[in-house]
């Protein structure tokens, strides 16, 4: 048996792909519909079938164990293209099906009735059908309507399933953005916390302990410990643990022994500071072997054994080496299925470097504080500056590598007055004079572009008399810059979080874009931003922020030709052009760098692109990692927000449209009429309301079925749209009722509007609905009523008067009573 194949096969295949329902598991919502169909029609089998080019797939089965059959055996394939139900009273007598194996063999089909599943776009996806193995009386009209309604319920369930999946994808994209924001915020908080430890008067060992505790408590681990190895002695301190690792933490603290596999990882790490952290995912842990250990017998924690089952993921890194003691941070996860992710590795590596730098800084400061006299200062420690003066303020000693950072050399300023040496650093002059006066203190000073932490002390002779001053300064510029980067990372997270909140608002994207770009501009700190939207052959500026180069301001006002935007950007690729990669016209202009990031490309003719411009002569002309990250996350956040708003707008528009005719529905009528009356109240114009009742729909439904009735409603709607003016607003309230809002129409123009209804009736008759007619009535503002309810009531009364006066409810005279198709 060969089933029919139609031109709509490609459309149906695309629709089924969009619904993503083929070959899916049974779902209760669809199973409930087949069970209901079997119960309503008292049949042994009810199916929901979806048909592609080769087979029919049963999404829901009642009374049949099959999940699919070849299309060649499908009854439902014939029902796809039927305007009404396909009913086969006796399959054994039907030449299309009499030789079908499903008729000759199990389940011995005799009776079949199927209603097509029509998607909103008009494509038939399959059917809901009922099957019996015995002959049945013909279906009543009510039974036909019931099966058609069940088909509509199946389509509604498919639409609900699709919308739910789309909402889930949108939620997932938003969750990814939020995770990135949380990661940036966590990293900035960790770096700020570790940086603040270095500001405290703590020994390196105390900084290590507090930093390890801070990192462990924020990195989603179960146990964190600091192991100090000094010669033959090993000390293990638990700095943090979760409830799941409470017993493990107690055991480690009491025994001072790590689990064997953890010890193996630590042994492979070694004790060299600055080495990259090791993770159990990367390192092959060797099983226990018999060998002579190079470790002292007092270190049982470093025995090589397989990873213990309670330690599923392991990380170890050397935080620092101070004297003969080496400090090692070890992190464990005890739960199954928790390997170290790329995010974990990045966070841990950054935090480990920050802790290493903070403890190194603290160690240097401790060394400086422990030296009370200038002869014991380490002159070759980098980057230091050491100087002494006499009681008059003349420099008697200047040493240290730190001098090079401020443009001087050791000994170069000896013999000069302090006022002449630091003429551009008055704070240094004041501090030296204070030390000469007998004060001992610390102070931070800036010399040129470098920042120094300095200690000042007076010099005294053997009898305690003041003879001058001594000072030592440490170049902390890199540390200050690291803190600045941490603050910028926090600002980035806060700005992007603010951007995400802005895009949650209900205003249009155009109104929010300026505030959104302001949040991004604050995170970048310099440069200019423009959000471009394509309109024809030009990109027009939707919003802009920051310092825009002159050439970009010209493009903002005139529009940016589409041809100047790289095609790869319109295909979804972000482009960061440094100064050396800019086209020659831009190089000669006031532009140091350009970044182009796609924001919304789903509608090419309305594509949106985020552009960033560097125009500061002080900028190196190269996009930093920080700037790239800020712009990338900002573009993703803007894209997610725009997509969400577009989806909400589509849902709102769909709620105001009659799905059968495409006209406005009752909700749209209420909004349009209120808007028209408000406008009329301001301008003094008149507004007409025309109520129309289409006669003959019930007769047609009873005679030809609801599908033909729906066709009449659609044809009459098209005729009204052709016969009325462009500014008139046509609505279908449901059933056979229509309402038209007529701007500028009063009582004198009412007859002309009724003639337009007559013209629409004539066009509908000419389209094959010969017996159709309509009754109509017009009311106008302000002559008949001053509000929407009054206008609708008055136009309805006149329409019913028109219907009563004609007896047969016709606008045009007809011959003997007929059905609308005669």
Image (spheres, grey):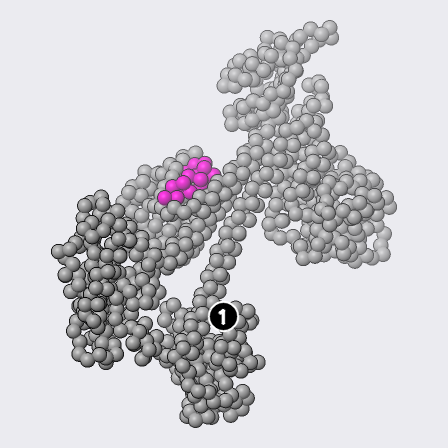
Q: Dot 1, crowdedness within 10 Å: few (<14), some or many (≥20)?
A: some
The residue positioned 53% from the left and 75% from the top of the image is: 35
Quarter residue 312 falls in: bottom right
Which residue is most to the left?
A: 748
Horizontal and vertical percent for residue 154? 46, 71
Q: Quadrant of the N terminus?
A: bottom left
Magenta residue span: 511-528
The residue positioned 38% from the left and 68% from the top of the image is: 120
On the picture, is 706 further left or further right than 49?
left
The residue positioned 64% from the left and 43% from the top of the image is: 218
Horizontal and vertical percent for residue 287? 79, 58
User: Is 438 in front, or is 103?
Assistant: 103
User: Is 193 in front, or is 131?
Assistant: 131
Residue on which the image places disc 1: 21
Horizontal and vertical percent for residue 354? 63, 38
**Is 758 situated above or below 366?**
below
The residue positioned 51% from the left and 38% from the top of the image is: 491
On the picture, is 37 further left or further right than 11?
right
On the picture, is 149 further left or further right than 181?
left
């Amino acid at each position: 048996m060969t089933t029919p194949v139609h031109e709509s096969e490609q459309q149906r295949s695309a629709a089924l792909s969009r619904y993503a329902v083929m070959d899916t598991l049974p779902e209760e919502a669809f199973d409930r519909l087949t069970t209901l169909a079997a119960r309503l029609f008292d049949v042994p089998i009810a199916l929901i079938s979806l048909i592609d080019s080769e087979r029919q797939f049963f999404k829901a089965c009642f009374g049949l164990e099959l999940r699919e059959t070849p299309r060649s055996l499908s009854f439902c394939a014939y029902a796809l293209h039927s305007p009404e139900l396909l009913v086969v009273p006796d399959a054994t007598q039907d030449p299309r099906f009499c030789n079908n194996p499903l008729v000759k063999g199990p389940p011995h089909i005799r009776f079949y009735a199927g209603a097509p599943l029509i998607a909103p776009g008009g494509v038939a996806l399959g059917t809901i059908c009922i099957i019996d193995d015995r002959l049945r009386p013909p279906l009543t009209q009510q039974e036909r309507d019931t099966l058609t309604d069940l088909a509509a319920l199946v389509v509604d369930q498919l639409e609900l399933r699709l919308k739910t999946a789309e909402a889930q994808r949108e939620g997932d994209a938003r969750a990814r953005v939020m995770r990135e924001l949380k990661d940036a915020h966590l990293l900035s908080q960790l770096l700020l916390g570790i940086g603040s430890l270095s500001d405290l008067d703590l020994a390196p060992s105390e900084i290590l302990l507090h930093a390890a505790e801070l990192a462990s408590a924020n990195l989603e681990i179960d146990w964190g410990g600091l192991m100090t190895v000094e010669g033959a002695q090993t000390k293990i301190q638990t700095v943090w643990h979760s409830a799941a690792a409470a017993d493990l933490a107690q055991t480690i603290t009491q025994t001072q022994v790590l689990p064997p596999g953890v010890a193996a990882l630590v042994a492979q790490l070694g004790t060299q500071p600055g080495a990259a952290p090791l993770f159990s995912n990367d390192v092959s842990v060797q099983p226990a072997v018999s060998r002579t250990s190079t470790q002292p017998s007092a270190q049982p924690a470093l025995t090589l054994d397989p990873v213990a089952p309670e330690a599923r993921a392991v990380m170890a890194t050397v935080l620092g080496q101070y004297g003969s003691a080496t400090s090692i941070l070890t992190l464990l996860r005890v739960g199954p299925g928790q390997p170290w992710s790329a995010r974990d590795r990045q966070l841990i590596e950054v935090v480990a470097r920050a802790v290493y730098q903070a403890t190194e800084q603290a160690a240097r400061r401790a060394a400086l504080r422990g030296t009370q006299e200038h002869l014991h200062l380490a002159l070759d420690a980098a980057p230091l500056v050491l100087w002494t003066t006499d009681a008059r303020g003349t420099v008697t000693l200047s040493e240290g590598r730190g001098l090079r950072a401020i443009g001087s050399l050791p000994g170069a300023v000896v013999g000069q007055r302090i006022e002449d040496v630091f003429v551009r650093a008055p704070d240094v002059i004041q501090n030296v004079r204070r030390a000469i006066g007998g004060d001992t203190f610390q102070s931070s000073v800036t010399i040129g572009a470098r920042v120094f932490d300095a200690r000042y002390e007076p010099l005294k002779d053997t009898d305690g008399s003041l003879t001058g001053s001594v000072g030592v300064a440490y170049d902390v510029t890199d540390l200050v810059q690291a803190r600045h980067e941490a603050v910028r990372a926090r600002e980035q997270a806060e700005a992007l979080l603010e951007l995400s909140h802005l895009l949650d608002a209900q205003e249009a994207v155009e109104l929010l874009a300026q505030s959104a770009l302001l949040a991004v501009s604050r995170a970048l700190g310099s440069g200019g931003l423009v959000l471009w939207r394509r309109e024809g052959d030009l990109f027009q500026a939707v919003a802009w922020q920051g310092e825009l180069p002159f050439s970009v301001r010209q493009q903002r006002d005139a529009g940016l030709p589409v041809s100047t935007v790289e095609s790869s950007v319109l295909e979804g690729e972000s482009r960061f052009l440094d100064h050396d990669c800019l086209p020659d016209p831009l190089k000669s202009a006031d532009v140091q760098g350009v970044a182009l990031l796609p924001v919304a490309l789903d509608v090419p003719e309305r594509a949106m692109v985020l552009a960033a411009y560097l125009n500061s002569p002080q900028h190196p002309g190269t996009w930093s990692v920080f700037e790239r990250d800020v712009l990338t996350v900002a573009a993703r956040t803007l894209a997610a927000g725009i997509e969400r708003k577009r989806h909400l707008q589509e849902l709102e528009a769909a709620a105001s449209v009659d799905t059968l005719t495409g006209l406005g529905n009752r909700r749209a009528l209420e909004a349009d009429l209120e808007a028209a009356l408000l406008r009329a109240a301001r301008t003094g114009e008149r507004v007409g309301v025309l109520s129309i009742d289409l006669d003959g729909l019930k007769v047609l439904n009873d005679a030809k079925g609801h599908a033909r009735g729906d066709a009449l409603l659609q044809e009459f709607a098209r005729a009204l749209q052709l016969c009325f003016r462009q500014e008139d607003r046509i609505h279908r309230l449901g059933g056979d009722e229509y309402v038209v809002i007529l701007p500028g129409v009063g009582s004198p123009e009412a007859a002309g509007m009724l003639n337009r209804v007559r013209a629409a009736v004539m066009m509908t008759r000419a389209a094959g609905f010969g017996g159709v007619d309509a009754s109509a009535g017009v009311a106008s503002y302000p002559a008949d009523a001053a509000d929407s309810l009054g206008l609708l009531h008055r136009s309805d009364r006149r329409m019913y008067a028109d219907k009563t006066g004609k007896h047969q409810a016709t606008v045009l005279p007809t011959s003997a009573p007929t059905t609308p198709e005669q």
